[in-house]
Image (cartoon, rainbow, N blue to C red):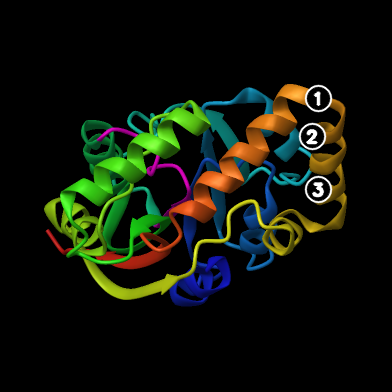
Amino acid sequence: MTRFLLDKLAISTDDDVVEIAPGLGATTRLVLGCEPASYVGVDRDPDPAGLLDTILDAPNRRVVEASVTDTGLPAASADVAFGEAYLSMQPDSLKEKSISELARVLRPGGRFALHEVAFRSDETDDGSRSATMADLTSTIKVNVTPMSPGAWEALLDRHGLDVVSRRELPLHLLEPRRLLADEGLPGALRFLRNVLRDRDARARVVAMRKAMKSHEDHLQAIGLVAVRREV
């Protein structure tokens, strides 16, 4: 999904790029391989931001410690803005504020992308949605609020972002092959070592994986690419 989004964003040496919640920088490395004109990562957690410093070795590459709802970046300062797995654990009010802020940062005609968790169908009944969200929230201990594909598109539309590409894939969070693909061998081994050494963390990961598997008929990964409307 990440490579699908980056392919559609078609980042070039002329683009000013903003990435939300870059974390440990796996996607950041792919972006910087495109040699954009500038790169800004926005992350509330200073520790991942510190780890990213090792790959941000040019004056036009930086990470700011800020919230996606208030990045502090100038209006219309980016050609590309994107993020992965940062909205599915936010209440609807913060989803709205986040997309509004990113639309503000984008120049007219700029490209936007997200990679989140969605229900498999717009027709998923309210009972199934409520049960799925309640189970995941109680297991992960964080509010989990996926939306239907249509609702994700409508969210972007309300903030002047016209969806031009959409992809849906099975959800494989915490599956060994997915972890290896996302984090690489060193990152996957580090994750495994931490889990094996911490009994509480191990129990939580097992419970999270079980919850994801039990609801896989209702959940999927969704990727959307949109363009900022001309104003």
Q: Is residue 140 visible?
A: yes
The answer to whether marks 3 and 1 mark residues whose Cβ atoms lie closer than 8 Å is no
Give 3 or 85, whichever is nearer the viewer.
Answer: 85
Describe the element under mark 3 as helix, strand or loop.
helix
| Left or right: 139 as drawn, with respect to 135 | right
Kindly identify which residue carries mark 2.
195
Q: Position of residue 211 (x, y in %)?
A: 51, 45
Circle 2 crowding by C-alpha within 10 Å: few under 14, some 14–19, many from 20: some
Magenta stretch, residue numbers: 80-91
Q: Position of residue 158 (x, y in %)?
A: 12, 52
Describe the element under mark 1 as helix, strand or loop.
loop
Kindly identify which residue carries mark 3.
187
The answer to whether marks 2 and 3 mark residues whose Cβ atoms lie closer than 8 Å is no
Closer mark to the observer between disc 3 and disc 1: 1
Above or below for 207 versus 128: above
Give 47 or 57, whichever is nearer the viewer.
Answer: 47
- Give the amino acid type for the residue marked by disc 3 in the picture: Gly
- Give the amino acid type for the residue marked by disc 1 in the picture: Asp
Kindly identify which residue carries mark 1.
198
Give 174 or 29, whichever is nearer the viewer.
Answer: 174
Q: Earlier in the sequence, mark 3 or mark 1?
A: 3
Closer mark to the observer between disc 2 and disc 3: 2
Residue shown at 71% from the left, 46% from the top:
58
The answer to whether marks 1 and 2 mark residues whose Cβ atoms lie closer than 8 Å is yes
Q: CA distance from mark 2 to mark 3?
A: 12 Å
> From the image, which quarter does the C terminus lie in?
bottom left
